[in-house]
Amino acid sequence: MRGDRGGAGRKVTVIGAGIVGVCSANYLLKQGFEVEVIDPALPGSEDQCSYGNAGGICPGSCIPNSMPGVWKNVPKWLMDPEGPLYVRLAYLPHALPWLLRFLASSRKSRVEEISAAMRALHHYTFECYEPLMKEAGCEELLQKRGQLFVYESADGPGKNNYGLELRRAHGVRVDILNADEIRQLEPALASIFKSAVYLPEQGQCPNPGRLVRKLAENAARQGAEFIQARVKDFELDGQELKAVVLEGGERRTVDQAVLAAGAWSADLARKLGNRIPFETERGYHVMVKGADTGLRIQTISADRKFVASPMEEGLRIAGNVEFSGLQPPPNMFRADALLKQARPMFRKFREGEVKRWMGHRPGTPDSIPVIDRARRARNVIYAFGHGHQGLIAGSVTGKLVAELAAGLPTTVDLSPFRADRF
Ligand SMILES: Cc1cc2nc3c(=O)[nH]c(=O)nc-3n(C[C@H](O)[C@H](O)[C@H](O)COP(=O)(O)OP(=O)(O)OC[C@H]3O[C@@H](n4cnc5c(N)ncnc54)[C@H](O)[C@@H]3O)c2cc1C
């Protein structure tokens, strides 16, 4: 497949080696491009958001974060110190414009557009990961066991559940379970759960950091060059990016570039002519090594808004959205709160070694990424802003990036992901 689609002899510089960057590198190689990847962090390392996510690889993910009526929950969440949302007071003036756009995205007509765009993108996640995982020798990192949303009340999902309506409208299979059916499907869960929504077609990755590392190794084996450095600036000439300037002063010439720098992308995009409303939605996890709960299926507490994921190393509890910018150190109180809330979920829970982590979700206010060309540099492709769904969308985004770079028609209509939509 390499070399047969127009990339031969041309170079693409990928900025960022998280899941989006390494998937892009792999698909660009398939198009015959020479590839270099620049990142100060090692692929799959703890500095990347892609390391510590909950592992959900869900083709049926089509529910934006900002849904009709979301504003009603915000005061309740903000008042609860262990709740799923936190805004640092001193940071509020900075985050406010983004938050207002977030609320504006909850209009039903806009939600329907966003939901359709999410489904169109995520629909291809398995088929875009599978060939890469096969080549990289890590097919065990995609498990198709479904995803379970559990409720502590008997009518948890409720009668007129708009989220379920959206999923069904997009052809996503949805099963409603009662307490007995939950027990049969996932015996590890305690009897506090009285109802659930099971999405049997969803998948999970039991080690997202290892996935990034394996895909990077696969790209390197095929000739991609990984450069451990930070891109600081750009040199433009007319409507073209001519070179990237690295911290330390080195200048590297560019034919085409991909901006896939996760939560750090917006400042770089501004230099390329696009002001994109962007925030880091800081999230936390605790990894309990050897927790031995017996959990098989990724399970979301729908009431308390966190995810419990069985991982290669143990049990990972992930969640929280914290607005306080890229700089402040993590507040591990939030990770501890996740663990405290998760313990009663399980019939048995053996305490093991606990590791806490915080990562930066690259957030746009409308829950969907930017996949487009830069306004002032048409040879730069944007691939960032995947928010809560970057693992799901990483594989597909990589394929789309390679199609754009090669000048091919794209597998997914990219108009919902335009940089100038805000
Ligand atoms: C708690 C939590 C749970 C989550 N659960 C899920 C889930 O279940 N499913 C899902 O799909 N998503 C989930 N996510 C979201 C997902 O992890 C992110 O959307 C995804 O990892 C973003 O990938 P990325 O490659 O864009 O960013 P990153 O992985 O952060 O990679 C960006 C890279 O760019 C590099 N970089 C930054 N600046 C520069 C520069 N100037 N020059 C060069 N390189 C630079 C960084 O060093 C970094 O390595 C979760 C996130 C969190 C925090």
Image (tube, grey):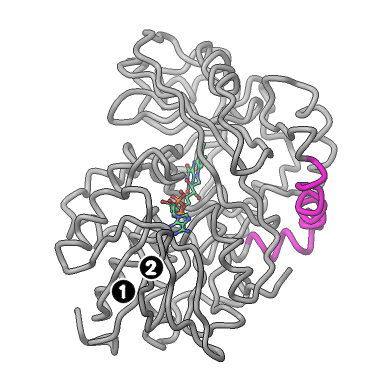
Residue under the point 74% across and 33% down: 88
Q: Residue furthest front?
A: 249
Is the stretch drawn in magenta largely helix, strand or loop? helix
- Looking at the rendered structure, the secondary structure element under dot 2 is strand
The x, y position of residue 93, in whole percent, is: 82, 45
Quadrant showing the C terminus: bottom right
Whether 412 is among the magenta residues is no
Q: Secondary structure at mark 1?
A: helix
Q: Taking 49 as reference, is 290 above or below it?
A: above
In the image, taking residue 111 as reference, residue 373 lies left or right, namely left
Crowd rating for badge 2 (residues with CA inside 10 Å; few <14, some 14–19, many 20+): many
Q: Which residues are magenta?
A: 92-115
Ligand 1: does it lie within 8 Å of the C-beta at label 1?
Answer: no
- Determine crowd level at label 1: few under 14, some 14-19, many 20+ residues with C-alpha closer than 10 A: many
Residue bearing the label numbered 2: 14
Amino acid type, mark 2: Val
Q: Position of residue 220 (x, y in %)?
A: 19, 61
Q: Residue 39's image quarter?
A: bottom left
Q: Is residue 201 visible?
A: no
Up/down of 348 relative to 194, above or below: above
CB of mark 2 near ligand 1 (< 8 Å): no
Q: Nearer the viewer, residue 326 or 315?
A: 326
The vertical placement of 271 against 114, above or below, is below
The amino acid type, in three-letter code, at marker 1 is: Leu
Q: Which residue is mark 1?
A: 28
Q: Is residue 104 magenta?
A: yes
The tag on residue 261 is none
In the displayed structure, does residue 70 sit left or right of residue 388?
A: right
